[in-house]
Image (cartoon, rainbow, N blue to C red):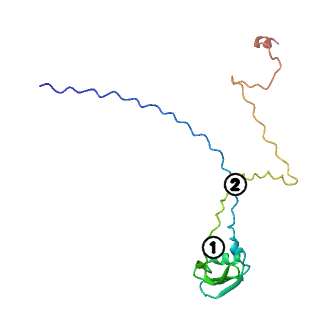
Amino acid sequence: QSPPVPTKPPPPTKKPTVVTTAPAPSPPKPPPPPPQKIPVPPELAAAPDYYWQHRETRDQQGPSTLAQLKAAWQQGDTDGTCLVYAAGAVDEWKTIDQVPVLAKYLAAKPPRPTTPPKPPPPPAATHPKPPPPQGFKPVAPPPQKQPRPANGSRSNGPQAGAGVSNELAAKL
């Protein structure tokens, strides 16, 4: 028997190249409308004075405006089990839960205002250089050294006999 012949592995398959492009930026969102107050139902607005019961002490409170009653509700001073009376709106003492329009109005919360993003911090303050004190005289910077020529000789500018050969200068 002959040993098994190894088979060639299959040729690698080419994966298709996928080109992606960044999505187009979306237009900026319009600012949200200003928060709206919860409208007062007409049947509640008709009563000028509200009398109500404190949640913990059950003492009678009022006369109060509807806005004051709502504030007491939001602070937890009254709740749906407390009695309320308002001539023209609630003509006899009832629990707040027994007056659905009032219970709904008191429990409603205004929409939370959206806060705009914070502006970027101001750039770091750059302080101008303070003026020098009176009587101050600046010191001149030290003189800069002139670079030397590459051949190592000193050159202090043109010298007498410049351009004259050494032989001629020896004869003089």
The quadrant of the picture occupied by the N terminus is top left
Point out residue 136 in the picture as x, y percentages from the top left corner: 85, 51
Residue 101: which numbered mark, if any?
A: 1
- From the viewer's perspective, is residue 2 above or below residue 68? above
Relative placement, left or right, of 105 versus 159 is: left
Determine which residue is flagged by label 2. Answer: 119
Tell me the kind of residue under disc 1. Val
Residue type at numbered disc 2: Pro
Residue 81, by quadrant, is: bottom right
In the image, taking residue 125 as reference, residue 108 lies left or right, namely: left
Residue at 85% of width from left, 49% of height from top?
Answer: 137
Q: Quick one: which residue is furthest to the left in this view?
A: 1
The answer to which of 150 and 57 lies nearer the viewer is 57
Residue 111 in the image: above or below residue 91: above
Q: Is residue 17 left or right of residue 142?
A: left
The image quadrant of residue 149 is top right
The vertical placement of 9 against 104, above or below, is above
Measured from the top left, where is residue 70 in percent x and y? Answer: 66, 75
Q: Residue at x 62, y 69 (%)?
A: 108
Q: Secondary structure at mark 1?
A: helix
- Please tell me whether mark 2 sits on a helix, a strand or a loop: loop
In the image shown, does 24 or 8 lie closer to the viewer? 24
Q: CA distance from mark 2 to mark 1?
A: 42 Å
Mark 2 or mark 1, earlier in chain: 1
Circle 2: is it few (<14), some (14-19), or many (20+) Cα within 10 Å? few
Percent from the top left, x then y, of residue 13? Answer: 37, 29
Mark whose residue sits in front, 2 or 1: 1
